[in-house]
């Protein structure tokens, strides 16, 4: 294992068989780029698409993988896609953790980030507590290792810090525009944004706060 530092964040680069969950969002996409720059062995990429969101993240994540291959000149990757009706934590992690349990991968990276300060997200037009997710204030630090075989280098950094990572790596004009953070679902009041951003969900507002643009 080695440690690299990007934008003041220490990121551990593990050896062995490595996997990463990539949704096509800004957080996991830049982490994928960093791993593809630093891991010589085959990188296993896991993406879950769900029908409630019209499987859009599959299209986006595939474009991200292709762009990272172009930017890093590393095509030693395998991309695995699963399909479910709804997105849940189980649907996202069941497949990669099955690989862990079968000793097919040794470490799974995820791009989970910290929420903005409560004073920030309380100004968003959509309340965070209207979603079925765990709310964690920025003062509540977490272990970077949620389980023995999973690693979240961004776990105690919010999306503004991720925006700095993009800037410092020179990816704001190349990789960032391909990412998608929108969580629009069928039945939401906003019109279907296609592969773009609805601009109205909590995640769109967080993205605008962090990057200054969708």
Image (tube, rainbow, N blue to C red):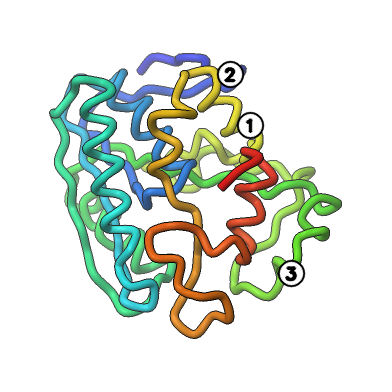
Up the image or down, 118 lies above or below 192; here it is above
Quarter of the figure with residue 108: top left
Determine if residue 156 is in view. Answer: no
Quarter of the figure with residue 93: bottom left
Considering depth in this image, is 181 or 191 the residue closer to the camera? 191
Which disc is residue 161 wearing? 1
- Calculate the distance from the C-alpha at mark 2 to the C-alpha at mark 3: 30 Å
Helix, strand or loop at disc 1?
Answer: helix
Which disc is residue 7 wearing? 2
- Calculate the distance from the C-alpha at mark 3 to the C-alpha at mark 1: 22 Å
- Calculate the distance from the C-alpha at mark 1 to the C-alpha at mark 2: 8 Å
Q: Who comes first in sequence, dot 2 or dot 3?
A: 2
Helix, strand or loop at disc 3?
Answer: loop
Q: Who comes first in sequence, dot 3 or dot 1?
A: 3
- What residue appears at the point 63 percent right and 31 percent down from the top-left corner? 161
The 10 Å Cα crowd at callout 2, few under 14, some 14 to 19, many 20 or more, is some
Which disc is residue 127 wearing? 3
């Amino acid at each position: 294992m080695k440690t690299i530092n990007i934008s003041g964040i220490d990121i551990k680069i593990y050896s062995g068989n490595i996997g990463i969950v990539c949704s096509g969002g800004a957080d996991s996409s830049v982490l994928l780029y960093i791993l593809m720059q630093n891991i010589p062995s085959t990188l296993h990429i896991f993406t879950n698409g769900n029908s409630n969101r019209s499987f859009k993240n599959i299209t986006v994540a595939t474009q991200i993988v292709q762009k990272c291959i172009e930017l890093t000149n590393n095509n030693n990757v395998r991309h695995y896609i699963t399909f479910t009706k709804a997105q849940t934590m189980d649907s996202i992690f069941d497949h990669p953790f099955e690989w862990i349990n079968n000793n097919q991968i040794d470490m799974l990276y995820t791009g989970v980030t910290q929420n903005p300060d409560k004073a920030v997200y309380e100004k968003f037009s959509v309340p965070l507590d209207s979603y079925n997710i765990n709310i964690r204030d920025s003062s509540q630090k977490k272990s970077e290792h949620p389980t023995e075989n999973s690693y979240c280098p961004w776990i105690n950094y919010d999306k503004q810090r991720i925006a700095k990572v993009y800037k410092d790596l020179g990816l704001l004009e190349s990789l960032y525009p391909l990412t998608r953070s929108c969580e629009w679902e069928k039945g939401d009041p906003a019109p279907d944004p296609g592969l773009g951003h609805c601009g109205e969900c909590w995640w769109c507002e967080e993205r605008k706060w962090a990057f200054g643009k969708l």
